[in-house]
């Protein structure tokens, strides 16, 4: 009985959800597309009272609001300023960028160490080919689970727009990483 009451309360809250103001792009309606006959004449018909369309819209909206996701990067360096000078840390980052220009490099400060991490991977398995590729130059490298900003993936998917975004950030004085020192 409690499950039924919870379900109706959840469904009523979904019904009262509003769309994001200022959105000018049309939301795709997956269920309407499924109901349309395809080139072979097949279509999907949902029978009965279904809350699936509302739940899918809720899921899409929640995903749009997320700014980070749990993923993996490969750590190639960790050191504190008392043992390594900033020039050495920057040199390590520059050397990696020269060897592997296609892999993004991130220098962050996590108290008390500077860490150089590379790549943006959805899971550990996805990081293994890159790890094997860099192991000759960085034998102590290993994957690290961390929250990755979604905008880092967007920059990789749209490199031509990166310069425009970087120019806007310089005007507003914002950093591209929360913990980034450089």
Image: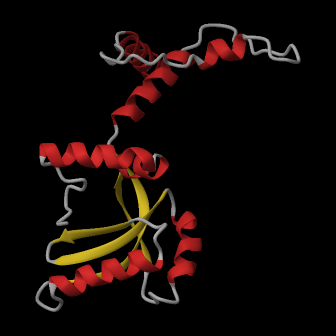
Question: What colour-coding does the image apply?
Answer: secondary structure
Identify which residue, 109 or 63, lies in the foreground: 109
Is the residue 42 above or below the residue 89 in the image? above
Identify which residue, 147 or 152, lies in the foreground: 152
Residue 17 in the figure: left or right of residue 139: left
Residue 95: give x, y in percent of width and height.
37, 82
Q: Is residue 80 visible?
A: no
Q: Is residue 113 visible?
A: yes
Q: Quadrant of residue 44?
A: top right
Q: Residue at x 40, y 10 (%)?
A: 15
Identify which residue, 11 or 43, lies in the foreground: 43
Going by the picture, which residue comes out furthest to the top?
Answer: 48
Going by the picture, which residue comes out furthest to the right?
Answer: 40
Q: Residue at x 32, y 77 (%)?
A: 93
Identify which residue, 3 or 105, lies in the foreground: 105
Is the residue 46 above or below the residue 141 in the image? above
Query: Can you say which quadrant of the picture contains the C terminus?
Result: bottom left
Residue 13: give x, y in percent of width and height.
35, 15
Residue 68 in the figure: left or right of residue 157: left
Residue 181: give x, y in percent of width and height.
17, 66
Q: Residue at x 24, y 82 (%)?
A: 89
Q: Quadrant of residue 32?
A: top right
Q: Residue at x 55, y 17 (%)?
A: 53
């Amino acid at each position: 009985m409690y499950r039924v009451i919870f379900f109706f309360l959840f469904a009523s809250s979904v019904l009262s959800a509003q769309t994001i103001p200022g959105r000018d792009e049309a939301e795709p309606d997956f269920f309407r597309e499924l109901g349309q006959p395809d080139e072979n004449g097949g279509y999907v018909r949902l029978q009965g009272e279904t809350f699936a369309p509302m739940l899918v819209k809720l899921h899409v909206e929640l995903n749009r609001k997320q700014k980070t996701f749990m993923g993996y990067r490969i750590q190639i360096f960790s050191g504190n300023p008392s043992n390594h000078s900033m020039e050495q840390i920057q040199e390590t980052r520059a050397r990696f960028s020269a060897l592997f220009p296609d892999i993004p490099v991130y220098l962050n400060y996590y108290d008390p160490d500077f860490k150089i991490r590379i790549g943006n991977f959805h899971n550990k398995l996805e990081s293994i080919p890159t790890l094997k590729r860099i192991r000759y130059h960085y034998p102590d490298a290993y994957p690290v689970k961390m929250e990755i900003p979604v905008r880092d993936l967007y920059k990789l998917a749209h490199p031509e727009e990166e310069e425009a975004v970087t120019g806007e950030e310089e005007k507003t004085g914002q950093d591209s990483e929360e913990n980034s020192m450089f």
